[in-house]
Amino acid sequence: MIRVMIVDDDALVRLGLADLLDGAPDVEVVAQAADGVAAIEQATAHRVDVALVDVRMPRMDGIAAITQLRALPHPPKVITLTTFDLDEYVYNALTAGADGFLLKDTDPAEILRAVHLVAAGSAMLHPAAARRLIDRFHATTQPQAVAAQARLDRLTPRELDVLTLLAQGATNADIATHLAMRESTVKAHVSRILAALGVANRVQAALLARDARLTT
């Protein structure tokens, strides 16, 4: 059972998402919050696997909330779900530790799929957000690329193979098939990659790989 928290200052949005998610047999909405402050309180009181977090909220916005959620002893995975796909929102959310970025006009089935993917350790980005990241990659300066490459030098050749596929959006199962590994071995490699690079999740690892021009 995937335990989900919904964080949005719009009560109707929370209701709609709760109806959608509670309709899935393996998903349970265990908490709701109207702002970041309440989200931290709820995540502390309940075990939450995945948090759907809006960006623009009173008291504490979504970016600050993501940072604090990721710092908890048992941090939930986070999907940012917002009306706006502004560059600053995409970058700030992913830098803060979000595992996904979706717009609120995303098809309900895709939102549900995102919850499953993120809970399983993958990432999910709205196409508009992915476009922003590609544009950012093409705008990466040489010093940024050199700094990113220095961090990738900490990895073994096999870990670089895994990171290359991860940065292209491959799931653990996809990577296992492509590299003829067990999926459990891929998971171990991914854990080692995140630790070696000093990043919080797959999305941040993929961003670093793109900055280093490991993949296009």
Image (cartoon, rainbow, N blue to C red):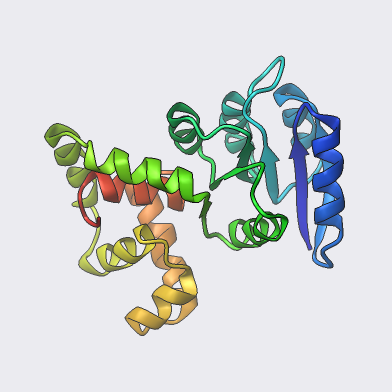
Give x and y (percent) for residue 118. 59, 56
Q: In which quarter of the view is residue 66 placed? A: top right
Quarter of the image where the N terminus is located: bottom right
Q: Nearer the viewer, residue 59 or 181?
A: 59
Position of 159 relative to 9 (above/below): below
Tell me what residue is drawn at x 70 percent, y 61 percent.
109
Residue 198 visible (yes or no): no
Give x and y (percent) for residue 73. 64, 40
In this view, which residue lies farthest toward the top? 59
Quarter of the image where the C terminus is located: bottom left
Q: Nearer the viewer, residue 129 or 25?
A: 129
Q: Nearer the viewer, residue 5 or 182?
A: 5
Position of 24 relative to 138 (above/below): below
Residue 139 visible (yes or no): yes
Tell me what residue is drawn at x 39 percent, y 65 percent.
189
Q: Nearer the viewer, residue 172 or 101?
A: 101
Give x and y (percent) for residue 172. 47, 70
Tell me what residue is drawn at x 67 percent, y 54 percent.
107
Q: Is residue 87 left or right of residue 15?
A: left
